[in-house]
Amino acid sequence: MACDLCQLLAAPAEGVLIWSDHQLSVVAVDEPEYPGFTRVVWNAHVKEMTDLDAADRHRVMDAVWAVEAAQRAVLAPEKINVASFGNMTPHVHWHVIPRYLDDAHFPSPTWAVAQRGSAPEALAARRALLPALHAAIIERLKVPT
Amino acid sequence: MACDLCQLLAAPAEGVLIWSDHQLSVVAVDEPEYPGFTRVVWNAHVKEMTDLDAADRHRVMDAVWAVEAAQRAVLAPEKINVASFGNMTPHVHWHVIPRYLDDAHFPSPTWAVAQRGSAPEALAARRALLPALHAAIIERLKVPT
């Protein structure tokens, strides 16, 4: 069975790939309730973080922290949520999710049952910041975090 | 309002604290469906990983990978799940969760709706490995991961 992330990296749709190099890709996630939701993906098909060596793990996490820092700087959310599961797609990837007091699941994780709908104007305001967010991610990935 | 994690670290109940030093604590989580569920907690009350400097972030994550490696070695789960939310308790902590094909939520994250009950004998077999797991965590935290 083909891996969803291998397929996505092989032919990313327009606007999906924010940044990449020979080891890592940073991808915009199309999740309507969560503008700014970003994934950091190890390019190679590797199952667990501890299948990578220490230097490669640090590279992955430094990219995660670059995304977190950019989300905080541009979106000013209430909290950042960071998670790596891979139960369905066992290919190292990190979810980096800006959370807000009024978002659909707060204070639960976004995988829990939704607690409310999101106000369209709040989502529109967050979507308007996505070009600035992507620019900030690219800028932070150029320099050590 | 007092922080749950600050309170837990100030007076951990018997058997909860697996390992600690001046910066980090590794804690056994009492989650009946998930024997081996472990948390890595930064001792100081800090909200986000990017509030820590790069060296401290590396220390936190190296402890997370030590726990992941110990879980893989002792429990041989299907997958490791790693997450840091902090929406309710904004004090840096990581959930490190061994996942199995027959666990209550697989392949969903453990925060989603449960898909089944766990077989008592499977849980008992996993619980029986906890002393070995805790010994392996302690051993791996003595050496660089």
Image: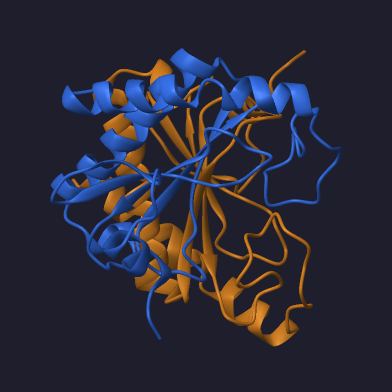
Chain colours: A orange, B blue
| Quarter where residue B49 is shown | bottom left
Along the horizontal axis of the image, is B93 left or right of B144? right
Residue A129, given in percent of the width and then of the height, sits at 51, 73
Residue A20, given in percent of the width and then of the height, sits at 42, 35
Q: Is residue A124 visible?
A: yes
Q: Residue at x 61, y 31 (%)?
A: A86
Q: Is residue B78 visible?
A: no
Between residue A70 and residue A77, name the one nearer to us. Answer: A77
Question: The N terminus of chain A appears in which quarter of the rendering?
Answer: top right
Seen in the picture, residue B28 relative to A44 is either above or below; the reply is below
Seen in the picture, residue A95 relative to A136 is either above or below; the reply is above
Residue A15, given in percent of the width and then of the height, sits at 60, 49
Seen in the picture, residue A49 relative to B1 is either above or below; the reply is above
Q: Residue at x 38, y 28 (%)?
A: B134
Seen in the picture, residue A131 relative to A145 is either above or below; the reply is below
Q: Residue at x 42, y 16 (%)?
A: A51
